[in-house]
Image: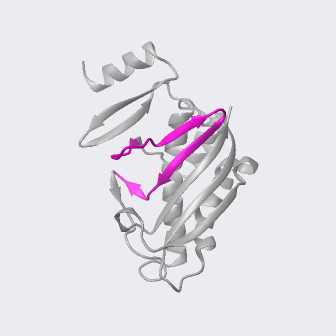
């Protein structure tokens, strides 16, 4: 049975569950629900944002956990097509504006995992509770909050009032793969 047939079978056999499949060295999470045309999905489409597949980490942790009505998303890097992007330090290789775009990409990856946690329906999101933003920056760089605005502004643009959140933004000496930004988050869902 091919991937498409297995996926369709699993959608019919176990709706609203998540499954994983392996492709070229990466594990992907796929929600087993038929596509949902949610208000948030329409907003993403209007913003020309396509959520990537929810990639499982290569280490001994999970991309998200659900406790009660809270979804805790593990730190997300600026990954595209399974490869880290934007390698370098803010204040040296990257300007604030470039780093804000990097933070947005981390936010897009967060939303991908959040969609998986919500069984494919982002309309289940009630609130972005908190974002944590780590900025790989030079010792003299002190505008980490401006970098964090890239992902914060995007969450408010997508989720509206529900996107307003608590946040921290800190400078660090290094991040995995040498990327410029990493973001984690906590969301309340129905």
- Which residue is rendered at x = 47% and y = 54% of the image? 76
Asked where in the image residue 153 lies, by quadrant, the reply is: bottom right
Of all residues shown, which one is farthest toward the top? 13
Q: How many marks?
A: 0
For the residue pair 39 and 142, the one nearer the viewer reads as 142
Q: Front-most of 69 and 190?
A: 69
Task: Choose between 141 and 109: the one closer to the eye.
Answer: 141
- Magenta segment: 55-81
Considering every residue shown, the one lying at the far bottom of the view is 140
Give the residue at the far right of this rendering.
161
Residue in view at x 53 percent, y 65 percent: 134
Residue depicted at 47% across the width and 81% down the height: 138
Q: Position of residue 52 (x, y in %)?
A: 43, 45
- Whether residue 127 appears in this view of the structure is yes
In the image, taking residue 146 as reference, residue 84 lies left or right, namely: left
Q: Position of residue 108 (x, y in %)?
A: 51, 51
Is residue 72 a member of the stretch shown in magenta? Answer: yes
Look at the image and tell me in which quarter the N terminus lies.
top left
Q: Quadrant of residue 190?
A: top right
Left or right position of 131 against 11: right
Where is residue 16? Give x, y as percent: 52, 22
Visible residue check, residue 49 = no
Residue 164 within the segment the image draws in magenta: no
Query: At which x and y percent is residue 33?
Result: 49, 24
Q: Is residue 19 above or below residue 126?
A: above
Give 61 or 183, whichever is nearer the viewer. Answer: 61
Q: How is the image coloured?
A: one colour
Reply above or below: 92 against 4: below
């Amino acid at each position: 049975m091919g991937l498409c047939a297995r996926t369709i079978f699993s959608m019919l056999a176990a709706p609203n569950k998540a499954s994983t499949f392996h492709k070229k060295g990466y594990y992907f999470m796929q929600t087993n629900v038929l596509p949902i045309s949610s208000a948030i999905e329409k907003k993403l489409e209007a913003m020309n944002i396509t959520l990537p597949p929810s990639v499982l980490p290569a280490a001994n942790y999970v991309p998200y956990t659900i406790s009660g009505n809270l979804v805790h998303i593990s730190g997300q890097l600026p990954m595209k097509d399974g490869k880290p992007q934007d390698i370098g330090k803010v204040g040296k290789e990257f300007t604030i504006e470039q780093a804000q775009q990097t933070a947005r990409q981390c936010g897009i990856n967060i939303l991908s995992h959040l969609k998986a946690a919500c069984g494919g329906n982002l309309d289940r999101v009630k609130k972005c509770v908190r974002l944590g933003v780590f900025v790989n920056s030079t010792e003299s760089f002190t505008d980490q909050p401006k970098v964090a605005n890239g992902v914060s502004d995007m969450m408010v643009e997508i989720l509206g009032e529900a996107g307003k959140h608590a946040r921290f933004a800190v400078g660090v000496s290094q991040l995995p793969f040498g990327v410029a930004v990493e973001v984690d988050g906590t969301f309340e869902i129905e």
